[in-house]
Amino acid sequence: QVQLVESGGGLVQPGGSLRLSCAASGSIFSINTMGWYRQAPGKERELVATITTYGFTEYADSVKGRFTISRDNAKNTVYLQMASLKPEDTAVYYCTLYQRGSTYWGQGTQVTVSS
């Protein structure tokens, strides 16, 4: 089994920055993909960014140039550095880990962008 614990959410003003972290524990295989999804009220959950073990990244068009995903393989931890935040970035952000056909989810962390 795999456990994911997110941290770093909170309230930030428009134009501000925030860094999310997610630590994975349990049965972690060396090859996997970690990432972040988000879900705003009344909307479907959407992909934000993913990163493979080898550092290959993908981003949603809405966050390209503003968000940066990274990971520390030794710590099984993934990060999401968010900059130039907008009110439309307000959502619950979920960490994910995909390995060998299974996807695991964290409990989510709230990010609110508001003045």
Image: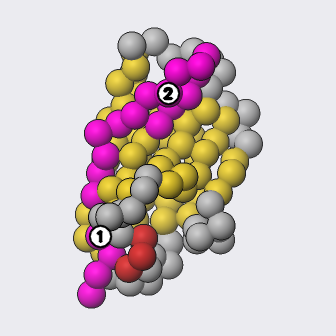
Would you say the magenta stretch is mainly helix, strand or loop? Answer: strand
Magenta residue span:
96-115
Image-based side of 69 in relation to 6, left or right:
right
Q: Amino acid at mark 2?
A: Thr
Closest to the observer, 9 or 61 = 61
Determine which residue is flagged by label 1: 112
- The answer to if 105 sits in the magenta stretch is yes
Mark 2 residue element? strand
Mark 1 residue element? strand
Determine which residue is flagged by label 2: 103
Q: Mark 2, residues whose alpha carbon is within 10 Å: few (<14), some, or many (≥20)?
A: few
**Residue 64 marker:** none
- The answer to if 25 sits in the magenta stretch is no
Q: Position of residue 113 (x, y in %)?
A: 33, 76
Q: Position of residue 19 (x, y in %)?
A: 42, 58
Q: State which quarter of the image contains the N terminus.
A: top left
Q: State which quarter of the image contains the C terminus.
A: bottom left
Q: Amino acid at mark 1?
A: Thr
Which residue corresponds to the image point at 65% horizontal and 67% vertical from the top-left? 61
Give the vertical position of 27 relative to 35 (above or below): above
Which residue corresponds to the image point at 31% horizontal and 46% vertical from the top-left? 108
Q: Can residue 16 be seen from the camera position used here?
A: no
Give the vertical position of 40 relative to 23 (above or below): below
Closest to the observer, 103 or 29 = 103
Q: Mark 1, residues whose alpha carbon is within 10 Å: few (<14), some, or many (≥20)?
A: many
Q: Position of residue 32 (x, y in %)?
A: 62, 26
Q: Can residue 99 be seen from the camera position used here?
A: yes
Which residue corresponds to the image point at 50% horizontal and 60% vertical from the top-left? 81
